[in-house]
Image: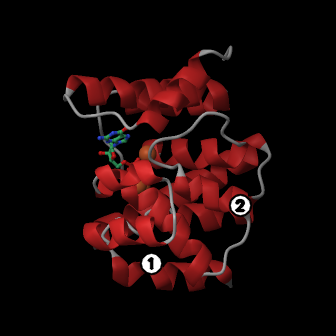
């Protein structure tokens, strides 16, 4: 089964804690897929692979960005921002995933983006609310995810932007584009 193959592939690339997080994202994404009518296999694949590049070497990731012509804005950012786009690149080149929706769900799982698909929203939200996440306010995000996917997306990206401002971290432009897009829709 694909699931077992992907799980076996990610396990040696991350600490136990990150693997447990990934299982949580997978289960949450499967739950949201059932609730909102997404293909469970696509959700499962994107969830399992979403953090595959989380522990990849930062300089190696920057080299890939340059050599493979990924978004040039990425080179000025650290692994927090790089691991999504590089994860998508690994999924495509090493695991032969050609489904662009799955690749985008991995690519944008940290920042979101303007015009996200249902699958992208499910992975973004599942990453934030999976059962092992313990930050203040996570319960409200879980409740929103139970009610409405766009409402949850708004709550999640707002929470993330607020956190970055509060902790004085630079905000990647694509995260801002996501926020602007989401708050201009009614949810
Ligand atoms: P994780 O990989 O499961 O830990 O979760 P994410 O991939 O969603 O996020 C990784 C980290 O990136 C978190 O610490 C976020 O706060 C951070 N992050 C998300 N968006 C931005 C951004 O626009 N700028 C910066 N500097 N960090 C961000
Ligand atoms: Fe991540
Ligand atoms: Fe996230
Ligand atoms: Fe994650």
Answer yes or no: disc 1 within 8 Å of ligand 4: no
Which image quarter holds the C terminus? top right
In the displayed structure, does residue 120 sit left or right of residue 81?
right
x and y, in percent, of residue 118 in the image? 71, 42
The residue furthest left is 167
Q: Which residue is mark 2?
A: 100
x and y, in percent, of residue 121 in the image? 62, 41
Callout 2: SS? helix
In this rendering, the answer to whether 112 lies above or below 132 is above
Q: Which residue is mark 1?
A: 10
Which of labels 1 and 2 is toward the front?
A: 2
Which numbered disc, 1 or 2, marks the residue that appears first in the sequence?
Answer: 1
Which image quarter holds the N terminus? bottom right
Q: Residue at x 50, y 34 (%)?
A: 142
Query: Ligand 3 appears in which quadrant?
Result: top left
Closer to the camera in the image, 89 or 110: 89
Q: Is residue 66 visible?
A: yes
Q: Is residue 77 visible?
A: no
Q: Residue at x 74, y 49 (%)?
A: 34
The answer to the question of whether label 1 and label 2 lie on touching residues, with beta carbons closer than 8 A, is no
In this rendering, the answer to whether 93 lies above or below 148 is below
Callout 1: SS? helix
Answer yes or no: disc 2 within 8 Å of ligand 2: no
In the displayed structure, does residue 20 sit left or right of residue 165?
right
Dot 2, how many residues are within 10 Å of its Cα: few (below 14), some (14-19), or many (20+)?
few
- Circle number at residue 160: none
Marks 1 and 2, how far apart in space? 20 Å
Closer to the camera in the image, 2 or 100: 100
Q: Residue at x 46, y 28 (%)?
A: 176
């Amino acid at each position: 089964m694909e699931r077992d193959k992907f799980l076996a592939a990610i396990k040696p690339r991350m600490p136990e804690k990150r693997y447990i997080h990934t299982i949580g994202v997978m289960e949450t994404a499967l739950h949201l897929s059932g609730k909102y009518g997404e293909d469970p296999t696509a959700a499962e694949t994107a969830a399992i692979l979403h953090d595959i590049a989380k522990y990849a070497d930062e300089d190696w990731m920057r080299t890939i960005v340059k050599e493979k012509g990924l978004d040039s804005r990425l080179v000025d950012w650290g692994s927090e921002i790089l691991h999504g786009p590089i994860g998508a690149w690994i999924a495509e080149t090493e695991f032969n995933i050609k489904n662009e929706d799955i690749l985008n769900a991995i690519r944008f799982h940290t920042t979101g983006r303007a015009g996200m698909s249902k699958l992208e929203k499910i992975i973004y939200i599942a990453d934030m609310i999976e059962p092992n996440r313990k930050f203040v306010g996570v319960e409200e995000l879980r409740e929103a995810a139970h009610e409405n996917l766009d409402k949850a997306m708004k709550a999640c990206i707002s929470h993330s932007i607020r956190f970055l401002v509060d902790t004085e971290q630079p905000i990647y432009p694509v995260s801002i584009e996501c926020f602007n897009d989401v708050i201009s829709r009614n949810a």
